[in-house]
Image (cartoon, rainbow, N blue to C red):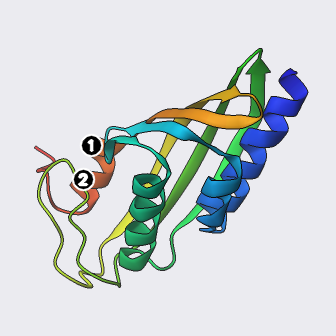
Amino acid sequence: MSQANKEIAGRWFTEYWQKGNVAIVDELGAEDLVFSYPMHGELHGREPVKKMLIEFREAFPDLSFKVVGDIIAEGDYVVGRWEGGGTHTGSAFSDLPVGSLRAATGKKIHFSGTSVFRIRNGKVAEEIGQEQALTALQQLGLVPTK
């Protein structure tokens, strides 16, 4: 089970985060999917999860992510570390816990995090993560560095 769940989470990470393929949410996401990161808040269901990534990639067209280290699985849970970033050259972006960005600020972000997936019946039921939200918000000029 753990190996199969690692493959599901790995595929989700590759398709959703790395490639920006939101169709994977309908294929691998549970209908009652819970998605939570400090920078994006808690989202419930497939459509909000797709909308968030579409808007994130419209604002940061060069957005990229990669897995760092090994993906670890135990039972229904899969954990992976990652790093990513991009340049805000696209649309205005307001899906942030504080402030918003006008279009094309040119500001760069680079941050890392850890994601915990819960796989239920071959579907991603939860993706709960911690990213360096403060670091990213400081890089975007929305939170002072001191």
Above or below, 130 relative to 22: above
Above or below, 92 relative to 66: below
Query: In the image, 123: left or right of 40?
Result: right
Residue 112: x percent and y percent? 50, 45
Residue 107: x percent and y percent? 29, 73
**Residue beneath the point at 40% across and 78% down:** 58
Query: In the image, 14: left or right of 116?
Result: right
Kindly identify which residue carries mark 2.
137
Q: Which mark is residue 40?
A: none
**Residue beneath the point at 67% across and 50% down:** 13
Quadrant occupied by the C terminus: top left
Q: Nearer the viewer, residue 99 or 23?
A: 23
Secondary element under disc 2, as helix, strand or loop, is helix
Above or below, 91 relative to 72: below
Residue 98: x percent and y percent? 13, 51
Q: Image quadrant of residue 101?
A: bottom left
Above or below, 64 relative to 32: below
Residue type beneath disc 2: Leu
Rounded to the nearest whole Å, what is the CA distance between mark 2 and mark 1? 5 Å
Contact, mark 2 vs mark 1 (Cβ under 8 Å): yes
Q: Image quadrant of residue 75?
A: top right
- Count the marks: 2
Kindly identify which residue carries mark 1.
134
Secondary element under disc 1, as helix, strand or loop, is helix
* Local crowd size for mark 2, using a 10 Å CA cut-off: few (<14), some (14–19), many (≥20): many
Residue type beneath disc 1: Leu
**Residue beneath the point at 25% across and 70% down:** 93
Q: Image quadrant of residue 126?
A: top right
Q: Nearer the viewer, residue 49 or 62?
A: 49
* Local crowd size for mark 1, using a 10 Å CA cut-off: few (<14), some (14–19), many (≥20): some
**Residue beneath the point at 61% across and 54% down:** 25
Quadrant occupied by the N terminus: top right
